[in-house]
Amino acid sequence: MAVKTPVEVINDAVEAGARKAALTNGNFLKLSVLAILAGIYISMGGVLSLIIGFGFPEITAANPSLQRMLSGFMFPIGLILVVILGAELFTGNNAMLIPSYLARRHSFFTVIKNWVLVYFGNLVGALFFTYLLVYMCGLTSADPYHSAIIKVAETKVLSMSWLTVFLKGIGANWFVCLAVWLAMSGRSLMGKMLGCWLPVMAFVALGYEHSIANMFFIPLGMMEGADITLTQAIVNNFIPATLGNIAGGAIFVGGIYSYINLQRDK
């Protein structure tokens, strides 16, 4: 059979979530390293999407969807690395820990503990990569990348209402966690990579808000001179995007597919 059934996928999700829970309660150092790696991997996707997506301004100026498509094509490398190589990504874990919790494999406190620890680990990894391997290397010091990342950061922080960012956060992680689910259904490397790639490309092209990706885009924009403050970044984007991501992953993927497919003992 080319792909796993939905029931097989939810059973795999239960086991994966239980392993994440055990790691959360048993090995803080390993969890931290895996979370830092995930932040780095997502930032790798971010810089690639920036360099390729905004690298043809003369062409994309007259074809705005082309820039979104090019960025969308490049960004999924981050999630592919997380899923295939193994790392702890906050947004993916928003969905992954719900089936195992509903199967009574661990407490809800463990879910929250994992989310908090992984979120800040992702932040450390994203800032490490963004500062040392993007900003300090001068990858975005010249136009069109310099102007592009400033505009991206200011747009994310200053141009949308709190509710809009929250709703876009739901959309982003709905797509991302569907990508994780598709990857789990695949039985081959290429199948898993394709499962990651299609939904992630879609969320980038649609302009949704992914909190961990924004740990790359917004800080880099600030480093390059974006006219935004740390408080504005946190209040206007990171908080609503993060809450939206939790809802998109935990409710619309982890929760719904657990309700549909999880076989509970009577």
Image (cartoon, grey):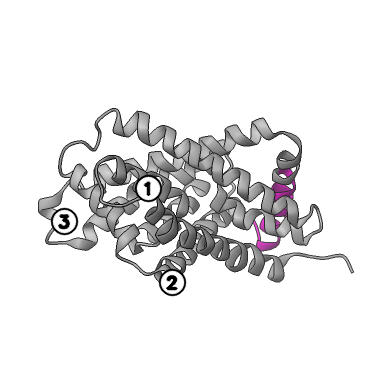
Which numbered dot is residue 75? Answer: 1
- Foreground pick, 24 / 60: 24
For disc 3, the neighbor class at 10 Å (few under 14, some 14 to 19, many from 20) is some
The numbered disc on residue 54 is none
The numbered mark, 3 or 2, whose residue comes first in the sequence reads 3
Seen in the image, is 67 located left or right of residue 79?
left
Task: Check the image and report above or below for 187 versus 61.
Answer: above
Give amino acid for label 2. Answer: Leu
- Residue 255 picture quarter: bottom right
Q: Is residue 138 above or below residue 199?
A: above
Q: Position of residue 78 (x, y in %)?
A: 44, 43
- Tell us which disc is closer to us: 3 or 2: 2
Do we see residue 19 in this rendering? yes
Instruction: State whether residue 188 appears in this view.
Output: no
What span is colored magenta in the figure?
1-19
In the image, what residue type sits under mark 3? Thr
Q: Judge by depth and name the residue closer to the eye, 128 or 91.
A: 128
Membership of 50 in magenta stretch: no
| Residue that appears at 16% across and 37% down | 142
Question: How dense is the environment of label 1, judged by Cα within 10 Å: few (below 14), some, or many (20 and up)?
Answer: many
